[in-house]
Amino acid sequence: MNETTKKLPKSVDQAVDRLTSELSFTEKTMIVNKSEEELIDLQFTLGEYIRKEYRLDENDDLMESCRFISKVDKINIGHASFIIILELWKKLQTIFIFKGFDK
């Protein structure tokens, strides 16, 4: 395992925490203002970033975490990236409400 692989998130929670710290306020606002149905639109941008940067094609721990959360035995990297986006959206919903931002 090389140094880069060690830094990869191993769980959906770790991936969401990392995204929360990496994304700008503007990006988080854009995500939080989407409906759950509109999140699929992020698959070509944020989803692609997640698939590449978090190496979903070889990150077995993160894929297992996605399978656990989705309660589906077999998922592909597209499904996994969407699970992470959905969990990020849920977290942002609570953060923005907690901080008193009016969506």
Image (cartoon, rainbow, N blue to C red):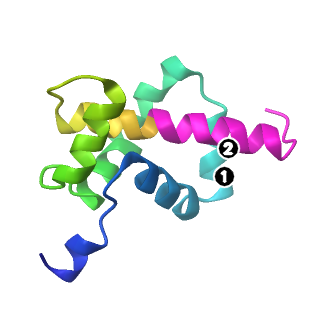
Q: Quarter of the image holding residue 58?
A: bottom left
Identity of the residue furthest to the bottom in this view: 3
| Category of crowding for the residue at label 2, using alpha-carbon neighbours closer than 10 angstroms: few (below 14), some (14–19), many (at least 20) | some
For residue 33, what is the image quadrant?
A: top right
**25 relative to 63, above or below:** below
In the rendered structure, does residue 89 fall within the stretch colored magenta? yes
Q: Amino acid at mark 1?
A: Thr
Decide whether residue 99 is among the magenta residues. yes
| Residues shaded magenta | 86-103
Disc 2 from disc 1: Cα separation? 5 Å
Dot 2: element:
helix
Q: Is residue 45 visible?
A: no
Q: Is residue 38 visible?
A: yes
Q: Which residue is mark 1?
A: 26
Q: Which residue is mark 2?
A: 29
Would you identify the image quadrant in which residue 1 lies? Answer: bottom left
Q: Residue 72: x, y in percent? A: 23, 22
Q: Amino acid at mark 2?
A: Thr
Helix, strand or loop under label 1: helix
Q: Are marks 2 and 1 in contact (CB under 8 Å)?
A: yes
Q: Main secondary structure of the magenta part?
A: helix
82 left or right, relative to 58: right
Q: Say if 82 sits above or below 38 in the image.
A: below
